[in-house]
Image: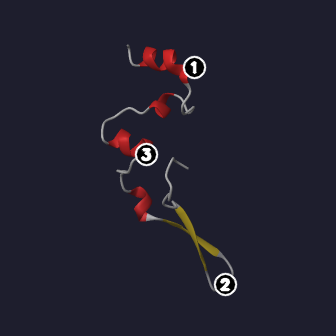
Amino acid sequence: IENEQFPVPQIGYELLADGTAKQTMNPEAMKPAEGDNDSGWLNKGYITYTLFDGSWNAPHYQAQFEALLGK
């Protein structure tokens, strides 16, 4: 799950008359993300902080982040 308020479900299930279920793929989930989230910014050509480290608001990782960007 990404940092989205309302994420698009990727997989669903359709219950069949015989009691079994058929797995379905949501075509909306296959579209490129363009929102204000990590994938959206990555698709726009930006590198986000969480691409390198999943810790948000973590100033103790600042040196690691700057080293990765060559600053």
Check the image and name the residue furthest to the right.
19
Q: Is residue 35 above or below residue 8?
A: above
> Residue 4 has which mark?
none
Quadrant location of the C terminus? top left
Q: Which residue is mark 1?
A: 60
User: Residue at the spot x=63%, y=86% of the render?
Assistant: 17
Q: Residue at x 37, y 56 (%)?
A: 31
| Amino acid type of the residue that numbered disc 1 sits on in the rendered structure | His
Neighbour class for label 2 at 10 Å: few (<14), some, many (≥20)? Answer: few
Q: Cα distance, mark 3 to mark 1?
A: 23 Å
Of callouts 3 and 2, which one flags the residue occurring earlier in the amino acid sequence?
Answer: 2
Q: Type of residue at label 3?
A: Asn
Residue drawn 49% across the image and 28% down it: 52
In the picture of the structure, the residue carrying the numbered disc 2 is 18
- The residue at the point 50 percent across, 57 percent down is 7
Answer above or below: position of 19 versus 41. below
Residue 35 point in image, percent of width and height: 38, 51
Q: Position of residue 42 (x, y in %)?
A: 37, 39
Q: Earlier in the sequence, mark 3 or mark 1?
A: 3
Identify the secondary structure beneath mark 3. loop
Give the distance between the C-alpha atoms of the residues marked 1 and 2, in whole angstroms. Answer: 56 Å
Measured from the top left, where is residue 58 in percent x and y? 56, 27
